[in-house]
Image: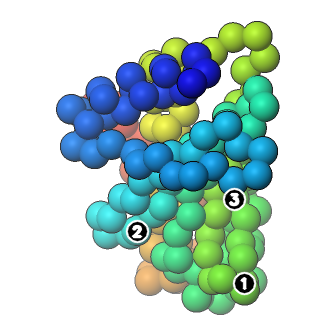
Amino acid sequence: MIEQQKILLDLFKLMEKKDGFIPKEYKPRQDELYRYCWKVKNVHETDFEIVQINECLYFTADTKSFAKNDELKILQLLNYLNGWSYYGIFTYSSLHQTIMYEQTHFCRQFCYSKEEIYDFIFGMTKRMGLYYQSADLIFKKNIPIIEAVNNAKLSLDKRTDN
């Protein structure tokens, strides 16, 4: 077991106490050192994953929420969100009707601490929340994309400031 994986496992114990769940270990795919996944279902269902390939940690989130709506609007929303999201990138699979978010963190010659990794997970969760709130405003209330994202961002900022 490599050092970064040990740190992740310690973090997962804390997450179980704080958040009520622990990511499950899955068989690594080609080139992966390890792979952990978990599913969160509140209003929207999201599949999260952390893998390490070489010296890079990959964090992903996948959802089908809103993916069956107008493809052009989905792509415009994701492009706008990508301009705001300096840590990762949103993509869309029309074949699988899935919205995907990926962020990477390179860790040459050091390991990320539990606090740093938890912050990466929190940031990814916040960006998925921004997607959900923005898409909800666009597709359910017909609010223009830029206005919807700005409103969603303000709403999320108020929640995380407390």
Q: Which residue is mark 3?
A: 90
Q: CA distance from mark 1 to mark 3?
A: 13 Å
Give the mark toward the camera: 2 or 3.
2
Q: Please tell me in which quadrant of the rendered image residue 67 appears.
A: bottom right
In the depicted structure, whether residue 25 falls above or below residue 5: below
SS state under label 3: strand
Question: Is residue 12 left or right of 16 when viewed as pictured?
Answer: right
Residue contact between numbered discs 2 and 3, judged by CB atoms under 8 Å: no
Q: In the structure shown, which secondary structural element does the residue marked by tag 2 occupy?
A: strand
Within 10 Å of disc 3 (Cα), the crowding (few <14, some 14-19, many 20+) is many
Residue 148, percent from left and from top? 54, 65
Separation of marks 2 and 3 at Cα, in angstroms: 16 Å
Residue type, label 1: Ser
Identified by mark 2, the residue type is: Glu
Question: Disc 2 marks which residue?
Answer: 45
Q: Amino acid under label 3?
A: Phe
Q: Residue 154 vs residue 62: left or right?
A: left
Q: Which residue is mark 1?
A: 94
